[in-house]
Amino acid sequence: MMLARNNKGLNAQLNLLFFVLTLIFCQAAQATEKVYFYAWGGSPQVNQYLQWAKHTLQAQKNIELIHVKLTDTSDAVSRILAEKAAGNDKNGSVDLLWVNGENFASMLEHQLLAEPWLDELTHFKLTRPKQNPAVLRDFGMDTQKREAPWGKASLVFYYHSGLVAKPPKTLAEIMQWLKQYPHRFTYPKPPDFYANSFLKYAISVLNQTQPEAIQQMLYQPVNNKSFDQLSKPLWQFLDKLHPHLWRKGQYFPSSGAQMQRLIDDQEIYLSFTFTAAEIPAAVKQYNLPRKVRTYVMQDGSLSNIHFVAIPFNARHKQAAKQVADFLLSPQAQAKKQQIDIWGDQTVLDMAALSKQQQRLFVQNQAHPSALPTDAKVKLLSELHPSWVSRLNREWLKRYGVQ
């Protein structure tokens, strides 16, 4: 009898111990995981949005997002490079990094990026990469699926709807449109950013019928052969276009801001910008007429996409992927696109979204001057950076005496 009671007591203690250990393991499994997101912190809108993301990620995925504010992204790249030099291959301080352009190229060159992980994200397919190859190129460079698109700025056009009933929808239509509205369009003089954007848009569109291998030369370092072949249709187009421009193409604005003033003064009726949210904001501030409307060209929109990347030595790599996937979700992208939150354009393709998901984007962007939320945008990739200086030099040589 005594032995049986002892065994019963021992079993009870073992059961209690098993229960406590199970509880500890469950709590450990559910413990909040931290993700250190190094991102530029100079914008109140961006910071406010990331605070919303932090609270939502905590509630939905039990991940604590810690925004490490940067003044220069290259500082984070230098930190990762130093960690690699010190042999820190697993416990890096950066889990996720907001990056693009030169900093991405630097990370690629020094092998600072995690192995390809983009296909692990459930929401990436919503970008429709086959239709929008720009989501796989960072300033013309193949991302190698080592970073995820987060947002974009793209070339959008705007016009005075009180003066123009039907704006041109393609580059070719601009020429026809100018015959109906002579001298009511122009673009800035290179090397202005907007001038470069217009030239890159034009050369991309004018070479769309070229074989794929030739088109790809736009995304590779330029050489004499590729420049001569691909820029030829651009100069032919501009030679015909310039006599119909504002002031007959003998004088060009200096900036996008000056083009806005020309629209406001009704000197021109059609213009463009690289930030769609800028237009309704300018209308609200009475810097543009209230009848201004924004749209995208049907033959493509030059896009500058910004990304998030995971360093090779990220301490919380799996959690960082969950954060990247969340940032790419319709919920997070729609929130970010709201003008009063950030106004950053989504990288998702509306055609890939369900009706319910599309409604997330419609609810919060009702300003009549804003780009329609259901606009279908065909993204054109940025050219390789080496093309810009060659285009500028040749443009100035041909037209830049004014």
Image (cartoon, rainbow, N blue to C red):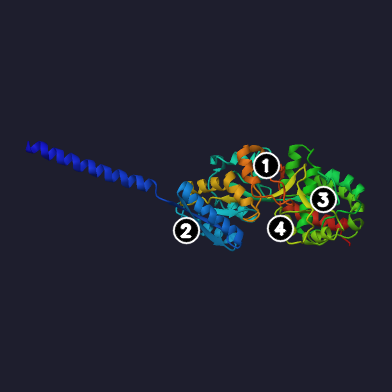
Residue 171 versus residue 290: which sits nearer the camera?
290
What type is the residue that disc 2 sits on?
Ala
What type is the residue that disc 4 sits on?
Ala
Q: How many marks?
A: 4
Q: Earlier in the sequence, mark 2 or mark 4?
A: 2
For mark 1, give the secondary structure.
helix
Q: Earlier in the sequence, mark 1 or mark 2?
A: 2
Q: Which mark is residue 133?
A: 1
Measured in 3D between alpha carbons, the distance from the residue under mark 3 to the one under mark 4, in whole angstroms, is: 17 Å
Give the residue pinned by disc 2.
86
Q: Residue at x 51, y 54 (%)?
A: 54
Q: Earlier in the sequence, mark 3 or mark 2?
A: 2
Give neighbour class at mark 4: few <14, some 14-19, many 20+ (Cα, 10 Å).
Answer: some
For mark 3, give the secondary structure.
loop
Give the residue pinned by disc 4.
281
Image quarter (top left, top right, bottom left or bottom right) of the C terminus: bottom right
Q: Are marks 3 and 2 in contact (CB under 8 Å)?
A: no
